[in-house]
Image: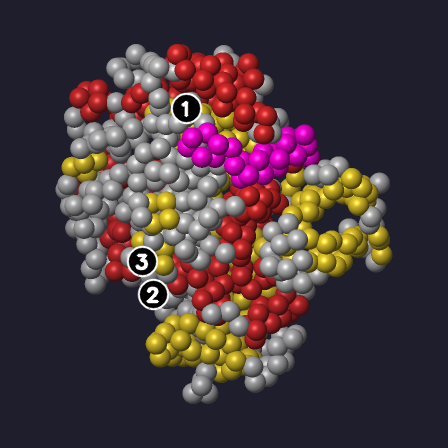
């Protein structure tokens, strides 16, 4: 990441710490009439009264905002000639009917005059294919003329929008990539952008990183004699792939800077408006290899007031988006939303109806789905929910899908359910705006460098429009979350590039899945964490490669062999990519000698190197498969395979107990007791009060007692939706209350400190 992005991000985080958050949007996407975003119906002024009926209905159901949209081509059909009639009409309607308006801006639908004025601004693929835009993807923002025109349009929008008291804020960029909403299907392996302007910007980024051409040549194994010769790498070679890693790191930095440019363009004109953006598929499910040019959530979150995600649990087919999947997505989003003191996150798009892409149609979306999905996001501290959309898509390959209502205007139970939740949140604005997740004691290291082992050679399978990727990296980050989810233990994802010794100090347990490649600076952070008293669990081949793709002389690499108390003595791939660890230690409470833990891919034999290092498990051939050790004031467990990924694909009882045992081993507090594994309990802290969310994810009635740690404080409990008191009992620093929930029911309590 460039130093400019880092500096701007830190400055923004500091500013946000004292920012007053005055509005919690519970909105529905509505752009006027039935045109699907980012399209806009013509003749807005003549349709104002017709649209008023929709706006009145939106307000009557309980929503407090509409999320309108505008595309650049419609908004500026000729240079400096702005057509903002639709925005004018919707702002008027919102003001007249007592709603707020959030504006989604689409720059990918760009006006033709831009290309005519700047004919050298077209996107260029890695193979040299020039992309002539149609309704998208527009023109490359690395062209200085395009960038200036882009920023000017945002400023013009801000100048108009700020005049309306109904205007609440922005989403500047929907699902950011280098290239959006256009798939060049004639190109076998597209990758963007390789135009001369992007290459010039890349060279400037490299100059900042390496300072001299000699250092670049050394890092890339090149013999360039001038900076003008430097090109992004396009090949997969047997020598080095540092150039490819640099290219993808540049894409991350560039997208962050582009978002910050747009932030500055609107904030200079309308400084009090909320500024947001949101990802398509957060990094938990997306790969940096993606051809469109993938952003990094932590980097993007530093550039705006709130960064968030799209949330489509039933996007367009039968996929593995079950309850733990949804929880992991929201916990991941919460993690970057609140990292470094940030104020939270928005759900930029929450699926309103069944999904479709051509013939791929999702399972039915029900009112119960909307209930559970919405409260799941709110229970993680979301600061805005935007349902997609009021009407189904009326055109395109998503035609007929994703609507809260029917295209003929029939109001559905889904819309009524979403509206009823919106009403509860709206009348408790301050409570939800001030709500913060409790401090977690468990962290899982998210390390996007894991995707780069082998460079382009290791490009994972692309999984579709939501950016999912079928890979062991994803499974590794999901498995431990799936195992701990039934225990209701708060869990953070921490980004390997952004964690520090200070930021890890709050965690009693840090789990590092699939740690094959990591920045050398991260190794120093992990060392300091364990030395200071932390408990670190790492999976196989820790630090095998550094951030340049160079192998360590000893594994665990970068000096971490000393921290883990062992070294790799041999490694092989398990038969059919599967293996198991046969436990022989009693050092993990609840895990007995003789138990077998399924694992995936590697069998890494580990040689203990210190007196305190003890073999904890073996592979079938008797070689050491796990080592428990101590370092400084902390302790470590080194696993010679990938246990978390194995649990994600094939959960088992012994593995579940293994992950639970890690909590006891590290001294992690379990703040919640729930009546059964199908009952999820989450809570937020809002000034002196608490918000408690109880979900029944089972297929049967769930009844019993919930216990929640509360220390010495006493609370009065209230059912937030019903506005009725709930009986609560106190004993031993816990609050107890009874629940009796139907399947898919959610109970939301406000605990008022007495």
Residue 509's place in the image compared with 463, above or below, is below
Residue 406 in magenta stretch: yes
Q: Is residue 676 visible?
A: yes
Compare marks 2 and 3 and give the one earlier in the sequence.
3
| Image quadrant in which you'd find residue 725 | top right
> x%, y% of residue 372?
58, 47
Please give left or right for residue 56 compared with residue 729 in the image. left
Which of discs 2 and 1 lies nearer the camera? The answer is 1
Instruction: Kindly report the secondary structure that dominates the magenta region of the rendered protein.
Output: helix
Whether the residues at callouts 2 and 1 have beta carbons within 8 Å, the answer is: no
Q: Which mark is residue 551?
A: 2
Q: Along the line of sight, which residue is nearer the eye, 280 or 191? A: 280
Element under disc 3: loop
Q: Which residues are magenta?
A: 405-431
Mark 1, Cα crowd under 10 Å, few <14 / some 14-19 / many 20+, is some
Mark pair 2, 3: CA separation: 21 Å
Q: Sequence order check: which comes first, mark 2 or mark 1?
A: 1
Which is nearer the eye, 334 or 102?
A: 102
Quarter holding the C terminus?
top right
Residue 460: numbered disc: 3
- In the image, residue 505 sits, relative to residue 45, either above or below, namely below
- N-term mark: 1 or 3: 1
């Amino acid at each position: 990441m460039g130093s400019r992005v880092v500096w701007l991000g830190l400055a923004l985080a500091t500013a946000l710490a004292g920012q007053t958050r005055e509005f919690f949007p519970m909105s529905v996407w509505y752009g006027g009439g039935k045109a699907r975003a980012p399209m806009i119906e013509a003749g807005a002024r003549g349709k104002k009264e017709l649209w008023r009926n929709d706006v009145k209905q939106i307000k009557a159901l309980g929503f407090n905002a509409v999320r309108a949209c505008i595309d650049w081509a419609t908004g500026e059909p000729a240079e400096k000639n702005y057509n903002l009639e639709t925005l004018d009409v919707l702002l008027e309607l919102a003001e007249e009917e007592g709603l707020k308006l959030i504006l989604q801006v689409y720059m990918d639908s760009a006006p033709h005059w831009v290309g005519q004025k700047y004919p050298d601004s077209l996107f260029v693929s890695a193979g040299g294919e020039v992309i002539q835009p149609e309704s998208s993807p527009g023109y490359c923002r690395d062209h200085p003329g395009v960038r200036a025109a882009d920023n000017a349009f945002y400023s013009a929008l801000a100048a108009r929008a700020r005049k309306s008291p109904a205007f609440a804020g922005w989403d500047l960029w929907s699902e950011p990539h280098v290239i959006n909403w256009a798939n060049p299907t004639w190109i076998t392996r597209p990758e963007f952008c390789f135009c001369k302007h992007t290459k010039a910007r890349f060279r400037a980024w490299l100059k900042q990183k390496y300072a001299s051409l000699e250092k670049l040549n050394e890092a890339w194994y090149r013999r360039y004699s001038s900076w003008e010769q430097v090109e992004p790498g396009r090949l997969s070679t047997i020598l080095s792939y540092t150039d490819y890693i640099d290219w993808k790191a540049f894409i991350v930095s560039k997208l962050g800077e582009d978002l910050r440019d747009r932030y500055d363009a609107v904030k200079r004109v309308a400084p009090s408006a909320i500024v947001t953006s949101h990802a398509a598929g957060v990094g938990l499910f997306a790969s940096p290899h993606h051809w469109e040019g993938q952003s990094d959530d932590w980097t993007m979150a530093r550039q705006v007031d709130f960064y968030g995600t799209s949330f489509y649990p039933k996007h367009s087919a039968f996929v593995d988006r079950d309850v733990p999947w949804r929880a992991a997505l929201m916990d991941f989003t919460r993690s970057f939303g609140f990292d470094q003191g940030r104020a939270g996150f928005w759900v930029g798009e929450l699926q309103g109806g069944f999904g479709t892409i051509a013939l791929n149609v999702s399972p039915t979306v029900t009112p119960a789905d909307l209930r559970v999905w919405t409260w799941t996001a709110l229970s993680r501290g979301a600061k805005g929910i935007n349902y997609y959309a009021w009407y189904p898509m009326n055109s395109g390959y998503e035609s007929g899908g994703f609507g809260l209502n029917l295209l003929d205007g029939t109001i559905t139970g889904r819309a009524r359910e979403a509206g009823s939740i919106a009403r509860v949140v709206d009348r408790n604005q301050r409570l939800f705006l001030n709500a913060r997740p409790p401090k977690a004691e468990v962290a899982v290291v998210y390390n996007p460098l894991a995707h780069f082992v082998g460079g382009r050679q290791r490009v994972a399978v692309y999984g579709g429009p939501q950016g999912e990727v079928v890979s062991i990296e994803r499974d590794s980050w999901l498995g431990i979350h799936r195992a701990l989810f039934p225990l209701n233990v708060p869990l953070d994802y921490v980004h390997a590039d952004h964690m520090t010794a200070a930021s890890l100090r709050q965690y009693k347990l840090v789990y590092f899945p699939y740690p094959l490649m990591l920045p050398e600076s991260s190794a120093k952070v992990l060392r300091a964490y364990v030395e200071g008293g932390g408990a670190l669990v790492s999976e196989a081949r820790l630090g095998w490669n550094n951030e340049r793709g160079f192998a360590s002389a000893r594994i665990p690499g970068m000096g971490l062999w000393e921290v883990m108390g062992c070294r790799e003595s041999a490694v092989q791939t398990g038969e059919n990519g599967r293996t198991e660890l046969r436990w022989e230690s009693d050092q993990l409470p609840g895990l007995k000698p003789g138990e077998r833990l399924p694992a995936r891919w590697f069998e890494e034999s580990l040689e203990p190197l210190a007196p305190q290092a003890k073999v904890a498990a073996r592979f079938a051939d008797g070689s050491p498969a796990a080592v428990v050790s101590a370092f400084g004031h902390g302790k470590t467990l080194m696993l010679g395979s990938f246990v978390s990924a194995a649990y994600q694909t094939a959960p088992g009882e012994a593995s579940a107990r293994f992950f639970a045992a890690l909590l006891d081993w590290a001294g992690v507090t379990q703040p919640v007791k729930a009546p059964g594994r199908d009952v999820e309990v989450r809570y937020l802290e809002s000034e002196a009060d608490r918000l408690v969310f109880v979900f029944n994810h089972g297929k049967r009635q769930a009844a019993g007692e919930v216990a929640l740690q509360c220390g010495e404080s006493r609370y009065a409990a209230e059912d937030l939706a019903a506005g009725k008191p709930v009986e609560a009992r106190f004993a031993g620093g816990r609050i107890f209350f009874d629940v009796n929930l139907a399947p898919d029911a959610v109970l939301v309590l406000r605990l008022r400190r007495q």
